[in-house]
Amino acid sequence: MYIYFLYDFIEFFAKLAYRVMLISKDSHAMLMILLALQERAPINFKLIAMNLDQKQPGFPADILPAYFKKLGIDYRIVEADTYSIVKEKIPEGKTTCSLCSRLRRGVIYTTAKKLGANKIALGHHRDDIVETLFLNLFFGAKMKAMPPKLATNDKRNVVIRPLAYCSEKDIASYARQMDFPIIPCDLCGSQENLQRQKVKDMLQNWEREQPGRINNIFRAITNVEPSHLADTQLYDFKNLSQARAEDEDPLFGDISNENNALNLALATENKIEFIRSR
């Protein structure tokens, strides 16, 4: 039996297929983490590295097979001409990421089924998740990001993101030290003024102004209070049947643990007055 142990989620996962998409620093870093876990985890699991050759012009098809062989790992090079489909369907100057992503996802899920894998590990990190949150806020009017763990629609696979709690800065530093063979994407990487890049720049500006802000935004995703939002599907605002004492803000801002900071002193027909406690 092949088992994969993912330390961030403290769970046991069955036979795993691993995706190396766009051959980015994130994918390489995740591969190293999974290989390290494969050696140290108190259980056995099978790891399959997958790269999707999208038939982009000039793609160096020999680099990754040689790299995977050097590491001594099982791998699959999957060929699918999604490049020509995207170029044909998306007008010049329009963003290709949405269609490209859907096509890749279909190939990945189908490949996982073919391999008999029921876990697909993706290399999205903390910053990717925060950027996705803002993209959905700005352009989809939806409070939605990317979870560390998600079942596919057909329930045949579970998508996991082992780097979900890792910052891009730390991953980039690690990638530079490891000197990974990075291969850029000629579709998304060549587009100017991508909305995701604009959101990334916005977040980086915030981070420079106030270090730690990106991490606080990510922590907020894990600490949601439905009673203080406005989604009637998550919270019964009509009947308040889910109301709890902790949903209400503390009286007088909880300034004093022993006595109220303010006391009601006067209440007449036209005036109400509070005074400070002594």
Image (tube, helix red, strand yellow):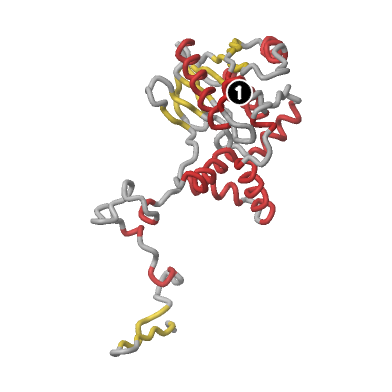
Q: Which is nearer the eye, 217 or 24?
A: 24
Query: What's the residue type where badge 1 is placed?
Result: Met
Q: Quadrant of residue 191?
A: top right
Left or right position of 21 against 255: right
Tag 1's secondary structure?
loop
Residue 49 seen from this side: no
Q: Which is nearer the eye, 241 or 230?
A: 230
- What residue sits right under mark 1 in the picture? 21
- Residue at 46% x, 42% y is 144
> Quadrant location of the C terminus?
bottom left
- Residue at 66% x, 46% y is 201
- Residue at 33% x, 47% y is 234
- Residue at 64% x, 35% y is 93
> Quadrant location of the N terminus?
top left
Left or right position of 144 against 52: left
On the image, the x and y values in percent for residue 275 come to: 41, 85
On the image, the x and y values in percent for residue 176 come to: 75, 30
- Disc 1 crowd rating (10 Å Cα; few below 14, some 14-19, many 20+) is many
Q: Which is nearer the eye, 167 or 90?
A: 90
Compared with residue 207, is residue 75 higher up or lower down, i.e. above or below?
Answer: above
